[in-house]
Amino acid sequence: MRKWKLGLGVAMLALSVSMPAFAARTDLVLGVILEPPHLDPTAGAAAAIDEIVYANVFEGLTRIGENGDVLPDLAERWTISDDGKVYTFKLRTGVKFHDGTSFDADDVKFSLDRARAPDSTNAQKGLFAEIDTVNVVDPATVKITLKEPQGAFLYNLGWGDAVIVAPESAATNKEKPIGTGPFRFDSWARGSSIKLVKSPDYWGEPVALERAEFRIVPDAAAAVPAILSGDIQAYPFFPSDGVSQIEGDSRFKVVVGSTEGETILAMNNRKPPFDKLKVRQAIAYAIDRQSVIDGASSGLGTPIGSHFAPHNPAYLDLTGVYPHDPEKARALIKEAGAEGLKLTIKLPPTQYARLGGEIIASELREVGLDPELVPIEWAEWLSQVFTDKNFDATIVSHTEPNDIDIYARKDYYFGYDNPAFDQIIADLNTENDEAKRKELYGEAQKILAQDVPAAYLFELPKVGVWDAKLEGLWQNAPIQANDLTKVRWTD
């Protein structure tokens, strides 16, 4: 009997040694709303391009992290001259493009010179306008000299429009993208999906996924059954009107973060009586941000009190400057002699604007104003509001990253003019110390919160839905990207 037990134990040990450990899943299907027009982020403005290739296929000298911070990428480190004009980048070595060609300083010079050339098709050519020269010091060192100091230069280099491409493949990147990232392009079934596979020669930390498919699923009617059936395991920018059908199902995570979309009730600061601070303050006090979020954004979105994204390290919560207070609103309207003020609110054709307009109009009526809602199409908004400045107020989301500087533009549509604010933006444009930049961003936010050139409503939400066993997808969207470098399946 003892021998039999011993033999059984040996057999079981042998069996356990021979049986492989359970391997975590390594494939992923993601749903995306829009199909990109092509796959070259240096030659198109469509956010759908970056949603596929940013950080996955293509990389830049720097990259933008989930919270909007600037991180090293193909440049492992850099120095900045005392006058803020000369940036010297030390590049990573041993890096190869997916076609086997080597990455070095010549590729950086080629990419940046190409992006800023007179015939450049780069959608964000202005990002490179301050570059004076790009010089190759040696294969692993690049020196970039600016015409004037530019505090946001490192951030600008992290945009998808600034990724590094090779001269050997730049012309064909629209259809066959070749970068240095952890995934390489595999195939594109037009109208259906785009597939990436793990790059075996990646210079950095290997990714956990072997394959990733981006499947085009344009609306909630199709997205919900695809998620529930398991055909799609992740939908990083999920249609908000489908969330209620997923919530409460333990198989999935519903993750709500923020974007770079500051949703505001912009006022025409050039036009009486909106040139009076008390009138703008009254409007801000009259609005209940949470009611707007509940009614116009399916209860999703983060209240804001200034023009800044909540996920940004420099963000200040200033929603308490003008909390919902109808009594204060009525008092200020009376002091300003604005009782019964008629105003038009022009609404572009988005849900947050049309539904939000109804709620805000009701709240303004409660404090003694007489708003009229005017629905318009985007082309009319661009001509009437943005170009001709023919408006009293409008509801719109500003989605460009770190765009608080628009309030310093003298011909911008809402006509805000404050020399103290302009000076802070000027200082930001020349300051490259991140701690000091954070302080300046804080001061800029405080001025806007107090002056209310616009009533600040909420940050457009990023709603992600994915399998509960997935980790590493971004909660926030400082840029339009689906960075898969940290994504993995858990047991």
Image (tube, rainbow, N blue to C red):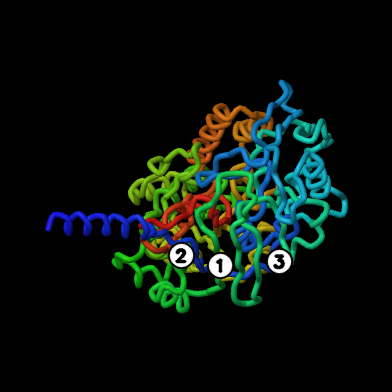
Q: For the view shown, which residue lies furthest in the right direction?
A: 118
Helix, strand or loop for disc 3: loop
Say if 220 sits above or below 184 in the image: below
Q: Nearer the viewer, residue 277 or 151?
A: 151
Instruction: Give the residue drawn at x 47%, y 58%.
Output: 462
- Toward the viewer: 85 or 186? 186
Residue 364 is left or right of residue 207, and the answer is left
| Label 2 environment density (alpha carbons within 10 Å; few <14, some 14–19, many ≥20) | many
Which residue is tagged 1? 213
Does 54 appear above or below 150? below
Q: Quadrant of residue 364?
A: bottom left
**Residue 361 in view (yes/no):** yes
Horizontal and vertical percent for residue 33?
55, 69
Q: Is residue 147 visible?
A: no
Mark whose residue sits in front, 2 or 1: 1
Question: Of marks 3 and 1, which one's residue comes earlier in the chain?
Answer: 3
Mark 2 or 3 closer to N-term?
A: 3
Q: Amino acid at mark 2?
A: Ala
- Tag in front: 3 or 1: 1
Instruction: Identify the residue at the far left of this view.
Output: 1
Q: Which residue is mark 2?
A: 234
Q: Secondary structure at mark 2?
A: strand
Q: Quadrant of the N terminus?
A: bottom left
Residue for badge 3: 38
Q: Distance between the Cα atoms at labels 3 and 1?
A: 16 Å
Residue lying at 53% horizontally and 74% vertically, measured from the top left: 217
